Structures are given as structure tokens and as C-alpha cells.
Amino acid sequence: MKAFLRVRMSQQDAHYAGGLVDGARLLQLIGDVATELLIRHDGDEGLFRAYDSVEFVKPVYAGDYLEVHGEIVEVGNTSRRMKFEVYKVITNANIPGHESACEVLDPPLLVAKASGTCVVPKERQRKVRKDG
């Protein structure tokens, strides 16, 4: 099962000088995709138990458009193992005198990746899975 979210980073998302967005904001977006995956799979939000890995590959700035892709890669009794990738799909063109100019990135630029485990207690699982 897969899901994705597209969002534009705003000045409110910028945490550092130069409009740099902090990694915690990216983790929040990953958590939103994880929640959607759990709702679609189990009919419940569940809880994020732990990240196995998180890697911030490239910087993200206010004005960048991001896509957060997530996928359930393994299903246990109550655990759902997931993988995520965050891509920058549009960025500021940085053209002097044209501050609002932007570029569509083709291909998109991988800016972060993560994996982790979410849990949906058995009594909260409302959907009957094909595998059980």
C-alpha cells in the first residue's frame, strides 16, 4: 500500500537563516503520510513506534514544493513496517530581479528518506485484510 502528500514549505516552516527548513518539519510530514497509510490499511490512525533510520540528504528551503512518498513494506500482527522518501519537486530559480521565479525539477530531487514501524493495536484494527 502506498500514499503520498504534496506540500509547499512556507516562511513559517523555515527555522534557520536563509529560509532553511529543519528536519523536524520533514519528520512531521512523514508522520502524516504514515497516519494516512494506517487509516487506509486498518481504519485507525495507530501510533508511530520507532524510526529505524532517518537521513537528510539535501537542504529544503521556504518556497520549495515537496512530495512525501510512503509505503507499507511489511505487515505483522499489530506492526506495520514503512519506508518513506521525500522529494523536492519545485524550487526557487534564484534569478536576481525575479524573486518569484521557480523551477520544476525533472527528475525530482531526493531530500530525505526514512524507515520505521507503526503499531495498530488488534482491537483498533477495523478493516479485514486479505491476508488474514
Image: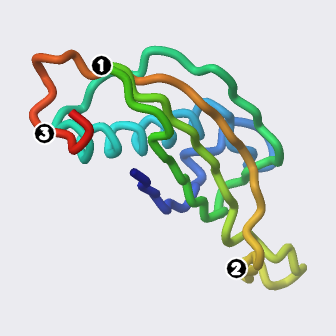
Nearest the eye: 97 or 77: 77
Residue 124's place in the image compared with 86, above or below, is above
Q: Amino acid at mark 2?
A: Ser
Between marks 2 and 3 in the image, the one whose residue lies nearer the viewer: 3
Q: Which residue is mark 1?
A: 78
- Calculate the distance from the C-alpha at mark 3 to the C-alpha at mark 1: 13 Å
Residue for badge 3: 127
Q: Residue furthest front?
A: 131
Residue 100 is labelled as 2
Which image quadrant is residue 93 in?
bottom right
Estimate the spatial distance between the alpha carbons at disc 1 and disc 2, rounded to whole Å.
47 Å
- Image position, residue 115 (x, y; %): 60, 31
Q: Nearer the viewer, residue 128 or 113?
A: 128
Q: Secondary structure at mark 3?
A: loop
Amino acid under disc 3? Lys
Q: Residue 109 at what x, y percent from top left?
A: 77, 62
Q: Earlier in the sequence, mark 2 or mark 3?
A: 2
Q: Earlier in the sequence, mark 3 or mark 1?
A: 1
